[in-house]
Structure formats: C-alpha cells, structure tokens
Image (spheres, rainbow, N blue to C red):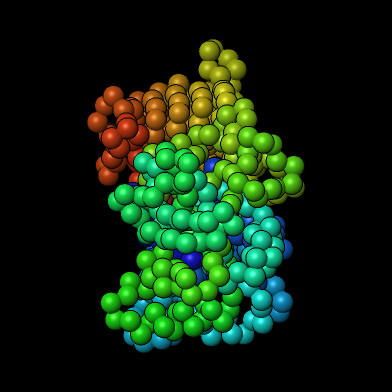
Amino acid sequence: MVLAGGEGRRLLPLTRDRSKPAVPFGGRYRVIDFVLSNLVNSGIDRIYVLTQYKAQSLIEHLQRAWIRMNGRDSFLVAVPAQMQIGSSWYCGTANAVHQNLHLLERCATEVIAVFGSDHIYKMNVEQMVDFHLMRDSAVTIAAMPVPIEEASSFGVIQVDTQSRIVGFQEKPSDPTPIPGQEDMALVSMGNYLFDPTVLREALIRDADISTSANDFGRDILPDLLGSVPMFAYDFRRNRIPNERESERAYWRDIGSIDAYYDANLDLKNVQPRLNLYNWDWPIRTASFADPPAKFVFDENERRGMAVQSILAGGSIIAGGYVKDSVIGRNVFVDAGATVVDSILQDNVTIGAGAEIVRAVIDKNAQIPAGCKVTPAVDPQVPGSLITASGITVVPRAALPPEHASAREY
C-alpha cells in the first residue's frame, strides 16, 4: 500500500495543481517513481497506490509509466478515495488503509508493506522484509539517524540493543537522542511492514476511537508499542547492487522548496549522492517519443552550451548558456539567455537575453526576452515567490509554449 495523497503545502506553488508525489524531479521523473521503483526492483509487484489530493496528474502518470503492471498476480492499481467505510474521504494515513482493507483481504500475503511516496531514496525492500521475518516481527519501521535539530519533523524512535522499539515520539518538540550520540536522533522513514492480522486489528480498533487522528505515527504505532514485537530496521545496513560507498543511506525528505532544490541540483554533480546511472537499480518512469537534446549555433559568438547540467530529451539550447542546472523535457533556451543554478520543468521557454539564477520554473512557463528571474530582483513573473534562502519559484502555466509539440499532462 503506497500512500500517495499528500498535499505538500510547503512545496507551493509546485503543488498548486498536483499532489506532492506527482511533483517532477530530476528532469524526467516524478517523486513517486522512487518508491515504486524500489518496490518493483525488490520483487514486490502487487501494489495499490492510494490517491486523494489533486490526483489527476498523478493518475495520468501512473497510467503512462506503470500500466504495464496489470495482471492477476502482479499489478499496480491507483485507488482513489471512495468512501468505502462511512461518508468521509481519507482522514489520515491509517484511515486510508482502513478504508481499503477489502483490497488486502483479496491478497493472501505474509507481510503488508505500507510505504510513503514523498521521499527520494533507493532501497532494497527485500532486505527489510528478510529482517522483519527473521526477527518474527509484527511491525517493522525503516529508520535512520538524523541531526537532532532536524528530528522534530519526524517520528522519533527509541530502541534497545537488539533494535526492538521501546519508545516512539511523533514530531516531538524535544526529541530523544540516540544513546551515546547526543547530536543525533533515530527517525522513522514512514515505511512500515506489518503482520496482516496485527494491521487489520489495529486499524479496526483505531477507527472506533473518536479522538484518534487516524494516523500511523500519532495513533497506530504508539498503540501497538509494548503489545506486539516491533523492530526498527536500520536503513544504513541496506545495500543496492553496484552502489558506491558514498551513495549508501541516501534519503531525502523534499517537503520544502529548499530541500527540493538541493536534492535536484545534487544530481548534476560529478559524483552525486543519488546515482541515476546505476543500471542494476533503475528508476523507472514514463517514456516519451522525445527527440534528443540539441545544442545549436556556433557562429557570431552565438553558441548553445550546457556545463555540469542534466538535460532531458527534446530540449534545445539555441545559443543560450546553461550551467549547474537540471533541465526537463522540451525546454527552449533562446540566444543570449543565461540559466545558472536552476531547475526548469517540462515545456519551459526562456526568451532571448533572459537571466535565470537560483530559480525553480514549473511546467509550461514562458519567461519573456530580457526578463530577470534572480534573487537580486523582485519576481517579474506573476504568481512567483522568493524563499527566505533566495530561491525564486515560478508557477506552472496552463498551456505549453508554441514551440513545444508535447501536450502531455
């Protein structure tokens, strides 16, 4: 069960028209592609994706990228909120799974995975399942250490020497540190494995509590603590085939514009923490009939150039200059334009002589000739905003620019 109904308010305006799992990432992916790729690469191919908030873009992406998984014994199905139990939509992560218990009852399975869909990481889930079964665990939570000052944004876990969970705090104001590491706390990654019977009984019990927030972190996990075997799986022990030491235990919560920006721009580094070029662990996504990226003109000092950047198919650098940036599909950078330290989503047009610095420009946006989108000036595009760290965000436009043939979602 993949929870994909997140609203992602801190990512506005990127989530103005789409849910957080549908936000583009890395030039050609969506955020949800990472959890789905991890599951499929791990041999887990019976997947329900629970959607809710502004799900159209997400559902269309699932249909395009993942529809091939559609059989009796392997499938990936988008499940919108349907008021299966009562007259309410999904009212919390636990309630979302509770409303779909009938789907789980169709699958005879030893373990049920309940994973979030708004983080960027690579994980061999099979290794976590092996740990879960070896410990005869009823609930296993994927966990990793983070700096203590960041832990208040997560569920904080306390464990004994055998990794058995002995305490749980949901987004505490004063997180409990790891014993012997006062500057670090062990936090939940939002990825859980459950014994099916334990999960079913816990969800039914929680649904009868009128004061419950119907949330795994706030309600289900604390309620189970001490009554069933619960263990923390240390994500640092997870291994992906053919990965470098520097790539291990990479996990990013991209819930804010700054975190999203940093995770994207890491990809263009010579040795990024997240390696998209490991063919032994591919990140799967939608395929398009895009032409190759193109760099044109080398005359009269008009030269299309990109340095230390990622460019997706169909993009044309027509005499412009791109550096340290992530460029999506069918992007057009006109003569004399400069794009530095920026993220351009699909179908963006940068007009001649425009200057783009430290910006995130969402799909279909057209930046006029000579326009400046930089931290040094107020946004010159309606609806834009500048974060406290100086990142300008230009919202998605309604239609692709005229030069782009693509009209996809």
Can you give x and y, in whole percent of width and height, for residue 378 in the image? 24, 31
Can you give x and y, in whole percent of width and height, for residue 377 in the image? 26, 26
Most distant residue in the top direction:
300
The quadrant of the picture occupied by the N terminus is: bottom right
From this view, report whether residue 152 is shown above or below residue 127: above
- Please tell me which residue is depicted at 53% across the width and 85% down the height of the picture: 102
Can you give x and y, in whole percent of width and height, for residue 150 in the image? 38, 43
- Please tell me which residue is depicted at 50% across the width and 56% down the height of the picture: 159
- Please tell me which residue is depicted at 56% across the width and 54% down the height of the picture: 161
Q: Nearer the viewer, residue 41 or 188?
A: 188
**Residue 230: quarter of image:** bottom right
Can you give x and y, in whole percent of width and height, for residue 385 in the image? 28, 40
Say whether residue 358 is left or right of residue 232: left
Residue 248 visible, this orientation: yes
From this view, report whether residue 173 is shown above or below residue 344: below
Q: Nearer the viewer, residue 75 or 396?
A: 75
From this view, report whether residue 60 is shown above or below residue 174: below
Most distant residue in the left direction:
378
Q: How many marks?
A: 0
Residue 313 visible, this orientation: no
Q: Nearer the viewer, residue 276 or 330?
A: 276
From this view, report whether residue 199 is shown above or below residue 19: below
Say whether residue 386 is left or right of residue 54: left
Say whether residue 90 is left or right of residue 142: left
- Please tell me which residue is depicted at 58% across the width and 36% down the height of the picture: 273
